[in-house]
Image (cartoon, rainbow, N blue to C red):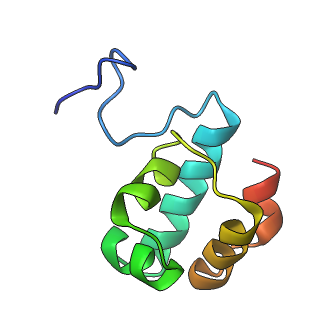
Amino acid sequence: MSTTAASPGRPYGVADLSTPAGRRGAAIRAARLARGLKAAGAARAIGVRLATYYNWEEGRRNPSLELAGRIAAVLHLPAERLLTA
């Protein structure tokens, strides 16, 4: 498994759970997997590029409030979980 230069020792694609963005990303990933969706399908349903979706799931970026609402609706995840992670 490769690792990113920005996060030595952490496997690529795994959110850093010590940060709020990382915990939010882990919640998004868990909800997607619980729904049986592939990342591409979730991104399409939310209406964003796959790269944008991966940035959220990997804890590199945070969604806007509007997109957090879409994520919550598509993944059946409480919006509060995305806002308070």
How many callouts does the rendering have?
0
Left/right placement of residue 42 relative to residue 24 reads left
Query: Which residue in the rendered view is the most extreme toward the left?
Result: 1
Above or below for 56 versus 22 = below
Between 67 and 85, which is closer to the camera in this rendering?
Answer: 67
Quarter that holds the N terminus: top left
Image position, residue 30 (x, y; %): 51, 62
At x 72%, y 74%, the residue is 69
Above or below for 35 versus 4 = below
Left/right placement of residue 64 relative to residue 8 reads right
At x 61%, y 73%, the residue is 71
Image position, residue 60 (x, y; %): 51, 39
Image position, residue 76 (x, y; %): 64, 81
At x 65%, y 30%, the residue is 19
Above or below for 79 versus 54 = below
Above or below for 27 versus 62 = below
Left/right placement of residue 34 relative to residue 9 reads right
Left/right placement of residue 57 relative to residue 74 reads left
At x 29%, y 25%, the residue is 4
Image position, residue 3 (x, y; %): 25, 26
Between 32 and 59, which is closer to the camera in this rendering?
Answer: 59
